[in-house]
Image (tube, grey):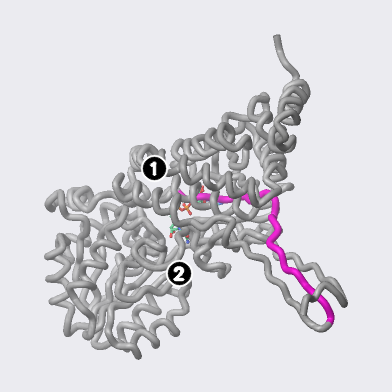
Amino acid sequence: MSIRQEDIESIVNEVLSKLGGSGEVIRAAAGAADGAGGDHGVFERLEDAVAAAQRAHKAIPTVAIREKVIRVIRRAARANARRLAEMAVEETGMGRIEDKIRKNMLVATRTPGPEVLTPAAISGDTGLTLIENAPWGVIASVTPSTNPAATVINNAISMISGGNAVVFAPHPSAKRTTQEAIRILNRALEEEAGVANLLVCVREPSIEVAQKLFTFPGINLLVVTGGEAVVEAARKVTDKRLIAAGAGNPPVVVDETADLARAAKSIYDGASFDNNIICADEKEIIAVDAIADQLKAEMKACGAVEITPDQAETLARAVLLDYPGPKRRPNPKWVGRDARELARAAGFDVPESCRLLLVDVGRDVDHVFARVEQMMPILPVLRANDFREALDWAMLLERGLSHTAGLHSRNIENMDAMARRMNTSLFVKNGPHVAGLGAGGEGWTSMTISTPTGEGVTNARSFVRLRRCTLVGSFRIV
Ligand code: NAD
């Protein structure tokens, strides 16, 4: 016997009305049982996914519902942090399971919820104006292969807190993990909050599907998290508001006043975290020459292994595509691999405990590992004559991406000069760069750091429309 969708809705609504609940919520939940309702958010057709997200967005009209939804997402994400971390490493070959668990736990815990959306009021002689945070509706979120589950959890919390539903465009090479994260969160939301399809995607993600979303009807805001090519592609064609979280090549400068043991440990821990695939991670070290040897010694004491320039050259040929050549770029096969696997690819070995390789490139600011966003645990160490030159090089290597830079120093004037001149979305002093993402530093966490379009470390406030309502001549209480 087949039961029609309207019949399911009517039965459910009758039960609900007796319980005193919301018909809208249950209608959205009932969608999960219908043929076009997909598999806990995973749909065959993009049209159905977007339509389901449009219905779901309407099912979370109140702050109370959104708070409940976010509680459920946090719980489900924490409970599945290990499983999703294991899946991501197994599917993409990138990163480290223990680090990915930390990342999943971090975003589940420290991504802010609806509480950050406070309205503003302006009261004066001519009356009262209220500025409210309204949802966009349905957001399209293009996600990277490097943080597949963490980006879903993080964006889900930030975007739903703003009252939105999300259509994800997963990276094809991280499709299973991204879809599993979506299914896990939807299942928990269906069971514990009675809401379906707040997070959706299609079963076969591709670059073409992502490009369709750039102009797809019913998408009100486009959020792209990825490299320079996808940001450029979206910018060219979209007629929607765009929030772009793009590539970085973050330099870290160490001057002669730094606490070198602390700097070495920060850089070792930060640059090797998840094998250097976080966009904000340290990608090249620029040390003032006078302390460069001591810094290297301290990093080796942490576990780093220094390789020779010849070994680095062999490594570059093994793990980069089109190298040497103007289009040299990381081979996705080697992105986020363990230091030991990289070493073996270049024909040498390092201890299993080694998380980071170093190569002293002297004054060679054109060295390929300094210029390319390698996203592998191999860091070049450059030797600058003084802080001024180090800062010039940092500007050159960050190349106007406005993403992240770091400094280890006790000199306040140097801190001030670098913060101002780099003009990056994140600037981290005397700690690992991930501290700027709330891992060991103050502030909230995000895996979507909007650099070219300027929203910075995103949270729910980045994903709302500001709406103003003005009442003339009354409602003041003073
Ligand atoms: P990627 O650019 O290859 O892919 C990102 C997403 O864009 C994927 O979903 C992919 O399918 C899609 N895509 C790629 N090219 C496209 C095109 N021409 N048209 C439409 N869609 C396209 O990136 P990746 O390798 O998965 O991730 C690493 C990159 O992302 C690095 O450059 C890193 O710095 C950046 N990143 C930035 C942030 C941030 O918050 N700023 C966060 C994570 C990753």
Seen from the viewer's position, the closer of residues 267 and 129 is 129
Relative height, residue 33 to residue 426 (above, below): above
* Position of residue 198 measured from the top left corner of the image (x, y, whole percent): 62, 42
Relative height, residue 377 to residue 76 (above, below): below
Seen from the viewer's position, the closer of residues 107 and 50 is 107
Element type at marker 2?
A: loop
User: Do the numbered discs 2 and 1 sit on residues whose CB atoms are within 8 Å?
Assistant: no
Q: Residue at x 55, y 55 (%)?
A: 113
- How many numbered callouts? 2
Q: Main secondary structure of the magenta part?
A: strand
* Position of residue 383 measured from the top left corner of the image (x, y, whole percent): 22, 79
Kindly indicate the quadrant of the structure image that contains residue 42.
top right
Q: Quadrant of the C terminus?
A: bottom right
* Position of residue 72 measured from the top left corner of the image (x, y, whole percent): 52, 42
**Is residue 395 inside the magenta stretch?**
no
Label 1 packing within 10 angstroms: few (<14), some (14-19), many (20+): many
Q: Residue at x 13, y 65 (%)?
A: 300
Q: Which residue is mark 1?
A: 81
Q: Earlier in the sequence, mark 2 or mark 1?
A: 1
> Where does the magenta region start and end?
126-144
Element type at marker 1?
A: helix
Kindly indicate the quadrant of the structure image that contains residue 385.
bottom left
**Is residue 137 inside the magenta stretch?**
yes
Seen from the viewer's position, the closer of residues 150 and 395 is 150
Kindly indicate the quadrant of the structure image that contains residue 247.
bottom left
Residue 449 in view of the camera = yes
Q: Residue at x 42, y 50 (%)?
A: 147
Q: Which residue is mark 2?
A: 403
- Of tags 2 and 1, the one toward the viewer is 1
- For label 2, being within 8 Å of ligand 1 is answered yes
Kind of residue sitting beneath label 2: His
Relative height, residue 229 to residue 100 (above, below): below
